[in-house]
Image (tube, coloured by chain):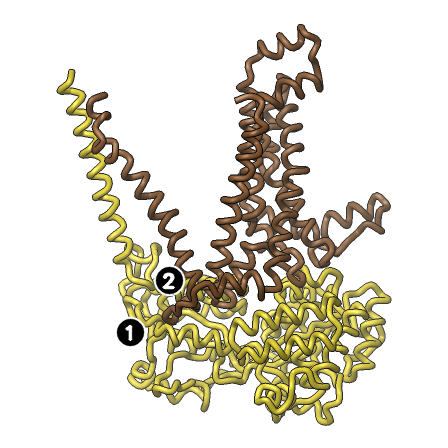
Amino acid sequence: MEKALSNRWVLALFLLPGLTLFSVFFLYPVCRTVFFSLHEWDGIQPMKFIGLSNYVKMFTDDPNFYPAVQNGFVFVLFSLIFQLPAAFILAMLVSRKIKGSKWFRNVYFFPVIMSTTMVSLLWSKIYDPAIGLLNAFLRSIGLESMTQLWLGDTKTSLLSVVFVLVWQFVGYHMLIMFAGIQSIPDHIYEAARLDGATGWKSVRHITLPLLSDVLKVDVVLAVVGSLKVFEQVYVMTGGGPDNSSTVIAVRMFQEAFLKMNFGYGSTLAVYLVVQCLLISWVINKLMSRNTVYS
Amino acid sequence: MNLSKRFITSLLTIGLGASLVLSGCGSTGGNSEAPGTNGSSGNTAKDGGSLTLWMFNTDDYLKPVAEEIAEEMNIKLNYEFINPETYKTKIKVAISANELPDVFAQYAGKSERESVLNAKMAAPLNDTLQSTGLENSFNDGMLIKEEDGNIYSLPYRPDQSYLLAYNKKLMSELGVKAPTTWEELMNIIKAANDKGIAPIALGGKDRWPGEIIYNMLVLREDKDAYTKAQNGEMSFADKPFVDAADKLIELVKANAFQSGFLGNSDLEARELFYGGKALMIINGSWIFSKAIPALGDDLGYVKFPKTGAEADPFSSNMGEKSTAPYGLYVNAKSKQLELSKEFAVRYSLKVNESLAKLGQATYAQTEVKPEGVVNEAYAQYLKDYSEYSYIQTFWGNTIPAAVNEENRDLNQKLYTGSLPSSEFVQMMDKIMKQQ
């Protein structure tokens, strides 16, 4: 067996299915998208090569491009500031050997397995200014002045959608962190306890450092997930009102499928991929430098 | 032992190869499935075959009528209703991917129609219309002949136009009458707001309902303004366009639309009106099919009020009377092309009969008479419609999709209050000149 597996050709043969799938479903579409981005194409008529014109248009002549990029970073910011800390706190809580912790773990994870479209529709109803639960709740506790139009107002639409994304995927990050916390040996905590490190001290000096690799993965997933956000925005606001909640993925969809500008839509897609790759690389570099334990 | 290891390795290799070959075979089989068929057809098909039909209109009679025709033709029909907003995307993707169903509906509008015709995805229907002798059943001008002399689409809904519908009960509770002038409209809006009733239901999230209100306000300023601007005889930044924008801004400032209307879709806005939660709705005559059963005799209708400088406002209206109307198309690559064509022709005519039964406007000759009493508001609408001397096609149906989308985005700025009318018209002029 070892002899067979040391044969390069056999190894190559075993790698072939995975490589084929990766090439067909990832590399090829990415290459095609780059190819389309260099063309003017409505998806039906023959393509016309226009070089980098779509990229020039994206950076210099698309009034919605920079707001979309900015909104993407708002999603990232809120994911990092609220989603991951909340996930960490929840992971710490459900890691405790207390009655019902498994049940809580499932409850927090439940939104993750729900259809994003369904979650978005549900929240659209909650946000409805006339019949929605949120305004009704605010009124019932005497905070009528805080009621808003939520999705129907340019000032609140973006944050309303951001909240849903943060809420929905807290459980996802909680579960990853929970698995990481479970993998930390108990004897390290016991030794720390003997040295007087309990409570916040043990979290700060043991849990967080030993969880750094997991946190790095979580940060990358949260950032990339936020930059790629589409369904929540599309279902809840369609990027509006007045493009106030638009993001790159929605812009890409609008250009390709509503305006039939497949070429320019592909350009936005290429930008999104490059942006995600670049930011992931930067995060990896930054966090590798700061990793205390590996 | 070595032999057994070698045997296992060989076995794994053979298994891997076989799985690759089989998966290859599987995919070939999938690809050989012609567009226009789907998984639900096949074994369960009736003797006459099976067809897939895509529709996006919400009218209740469309599905039963399709099933009735399928029953008569002894075919298994897969009727797929797709949400109207989703459909706009789905049909474009299907055209690009060559994945159209056998028969499908398409929106009105230059770009929408051209997307089907330019892709050469629509089958000519002349032969079926002639062989069945049904061509003459359609009213004059209802079968659109393209430049090559072929007919590629069939009507399935009558001409539509713009209107202001209202809830009579709510209107009488407020002690006001349906508006005919700008001042009356503003007074009613104020009265409704004072009573906590949403004055006008509007689906601002979808953008087009808001856009056609602006189209209409321009028409009420000068009925020829849009045509002249398109022909270069005037600018989109001229007075009628500025005044209409000012009127719209004034409406928004007066809280004319329901709270949070920019977050509501058109269907949600309509439901608000059908449910008696909004006093008025400014929309197309397509709302009658649901508004009549929902509101019955409480449904009121008037022509869009005189809001601007047009001297003879009530003889003109916005509508869909164009060379690119809503249409029913047959996929040229359908595996059952002849069957699909026959189905489409019969379906179009059967829908026409349903319209006649409901007392609605028809597009083909029929002996069917209205069943029961025709709703008073709708009867008045039909009378008014027949008397219009000028119908301006909705702007969106006359311009390319990319221009239309940009114009809709811009139009929404009037509703969010982020642009004064002077800047708005300058930007609109720039967008419209892209055509």
Question: Dot 1 falls on which chain?
Answer: B
Left or right, B65 with respect to B126, comes to right
Snapshot quadrant of residue B387: bottom right
Percent across and percent down for residue A160 are 69, 49
Q: How many marks?
A: 2
Query: Chain A appears what colour?
Result: brown
Q: Which chain is yellow?
A: B
Tell us which disc is closer to us: 1 or 2.
Answer: 2
In the image, is residue B163 above or below residue B2? below
Percent across and percent down for residue B70 are 37, 68
**Considering depth in this image, is A49 or A204 the residue closer to the camera?**
A49
Question: Dot 2 falls on which chain?
Answer: B
SS at mark 2 in the image: loop
Residue at 39% over, 75% down? B118
Residue at 63% over, 32% down? A87
Task: Say if residue B87 shows up in the picture.
Answer: no
Q: Please, what is the three-letter code of the amino acid marked with disc 2? A: Ala
In the image, is residue B424 above or below residue A199? below
Residue at 57% over, 80% down? B433
Reading the image, the residue beneath label 1 is B338
Reading the image, the residue beneath label 2 is B97
Farthest residue to the left: give it: B3
Mark 1 crowdedness (10 Å alpha carbons): few <14, some 14-19, many ≥20: some
Residue at 53% over, 65% down? A57
* Marks 1/2 same chain: yes
Which quadrant does the N terminus of chain A fall into? top left
Task: Say if residue B363 shows up in the picture.
Answer: yes
Left or right, B49 with respect to B394, comes to left
